[in-house]
Image (tube, rainbow, N blue to C red):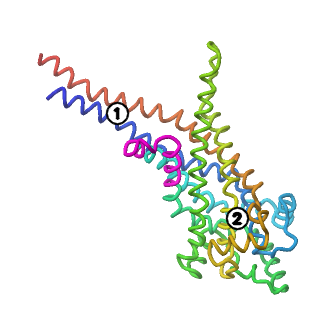
Amino acid sequence: MKESSSSTGLNHSKRQPDNLFVWREFGWGALAGAFGEGMMHPIDTVKTRIQSQAIITGNQGQKNILQMIQAVWASDGIKGFYRGVAPGVTGSLATGATYFGVIESTKRWIEIVNPNLGGHWAHFIAGAIGDTIGSFVYVPCEVIKQRMQVQGTKNSWSSTVLKENSSQKCGAQMYGYYTGMFQAGHSIWKQHGVKGLYAGYWSTLARDVPFAGLMVTFYEAFKNLAEHGKQRLPPGRNVHISSSFEGLMLGGLAGGLSAYLTTPLDVIKTRLQVQGSSLRYNGWLDALRNIWKAEGVNGLFKGSVPRIMWYIPASALTFMAVEFLRENFNQKSVSCVHEITNISIEPSSKIHETAQ
């Protein structure tokens, strides 16, 4: 009886660090996601404005990256680049938590239930599931964020409204100016209900599920390649690379590659979310068809450069932060748990020895 109870205690002590590790992944993921979004928000603003030009100002005279940066700076100053940062960070807190937290738990579950789906398939499925769960919070925040990014400051949006009204275009008449995150959410809810807050939901999933799956798959594949490269080094050449630096480099590569491959899906999502009441596109397929017809391949890959410019550093910073938090805090928490379990197991073993 003593032997079985002590082995149960040991199994419990092994499970407890695992559970702590998974729960900590949610916290580390949330902090890392918010950190990455906050740092790279100005580039995201430029990308959103480039992709939504066809709706706001029509297809004529569209700006490239440098022209858009100059236009935002001239009309809105530094504030224009940070419009929508609050909903952006809020959405990234949720999606970062579920992405990294669910990845670890789902990966382990898949490898136990179906070992044939181990490796890259397990990473892809785990990343896709994590991002899908986070989308329930992320999508409303994304809708609010992108509409605020498109508007810029109040004076800028007012002048755009006057210009478009005089040209008899409907783009700028889509919605009034939003003073903040909660006022924007209330206004969208009042005007369009839940459907307005979840505008472009399926197009967001169509973009984010493959993106999330690809990014974690590429990241794990690059880590395996890096490990393979270390093992092939000549004997005696022990190269130590910190997990944080590895996360910075490999996370950036994985994010940039995944971002480029999913740019057409991002263009469709952005246009569906910023169009408001003026339904230029009637759903995902209609948007794809019309963008292809009017703008061709260039239209589908519009904003790909700022998208990559955003995702390389954002993914690099996010993975670096997660690896840093894992390396510096998970080990401490696990060692503390082992110390506590050892203290709790010791007395029973001493009693057992005394009884003998």
Q: Which residue is pictured at 32% across the width and 33% down the height?
A: 13
Quadrant location of the N terminus? Answer: top left
Q: Give the left or right position of residue 234, taking residue 103 as reference.
A: right
Characterize the local packing of mark 1: few (<14), some (14-19) or many (20 or more) Cα atoms within 10 angstroms.
some
Q: Give the left or right position of residue 162, taking residue 45 as reference.
A: right
Residue closer to the observer: 123 or 154: 123
Disc 2 to disc 1, C-alpha distance: 46 Å
**Over which residues does the magenta segment extend?**
109-130
Residue 341 location (% of width, % of height): 31, 30
Quadrant location of the C terminus? Answer: top left
Question: As displayed, is residue 82 above or below residue 252?
Answer: below
Residue 351 location (% of width, % of height): 17, 22
The nearer-to-camera label among 2 and 1 is: 2
Q: Which residue is pictured at 62% across the width and 75% down the height?
A: 283
Residue 25 location (% of width, % of height): 49, 44
The numbered mark at residue 267 is 2
Question: As displayed, is residue 144 above or below residue 214?
Answer: below
The image quarter containing residue 160 is bottom right
The numbered mark at residue 14 is 1
Q: Which badge, 2 or 1, comes first in the chain's sequence?
A: 1
